[in-house]
Image (tube, rainbow, N blue to C red):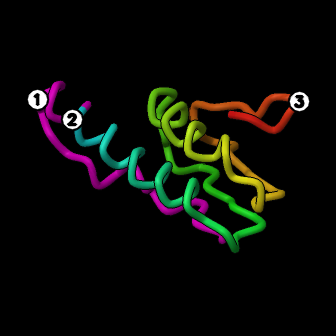
Amino acid sequence: MDISFNALNGGIISNDKKVRSKMMASFAESWAKCFKNNESLVHVDISHNSLRWEQMEIIGEGLRTNHTIMGLHVKGNQAEVDSLGFI
């Protein structure tokens, strides 16, 4: 699945920081759930979507128990993949 360069974070618009933060967390939780329940994806590219560190941590938790995704690209977001393959 290649959803790189899609401005995934760009649809979250609010002047209220608390509302924006909740919306960003909800967005990340949805992706985390998707990756956690996935049994068929083997490669995911979510690079260059302006995802923030907090969102990437949430998404990373969803990926932690996934054993089917072998390739993950996150460049251009506030995240790094460690030597064990975790965000």
Residue 78 image point, x, y percent: 58, 31
Residue 44 image point, x, y percent: 69, 61
Question: From which residue to which does the magenta span run?
Answer: 1-21
Is label 2 in contact with label 1 (beta carbons under 8 Å)? yes
Point out the residue furthest to the left here. 16
Seen at 26% across and 48% down, the residue is 12
Check disc 3 and report the residue beneath it: 83
Q: CA distance from mark 2 to mark 1?
A: 6 Å
Q: CA distance from mark 3 to mark 2?
A: 32 Å
Q: Does the magenta segment cover residue 25?
A: no
Seen at 20% across and 45% down, the residue is 13
Of tags 3 and 2, which is closer to the observer? 3
* Amino acid on which the number 2 mark rests in the picture: Arg
Labels in figure, total: 3
Check disc 2 and report the residue beneath it: 20
Binning the other alpha carbons within 10 Å of mark 3 as few (below 14), some (14 to 19) or many (20 upward) gives few
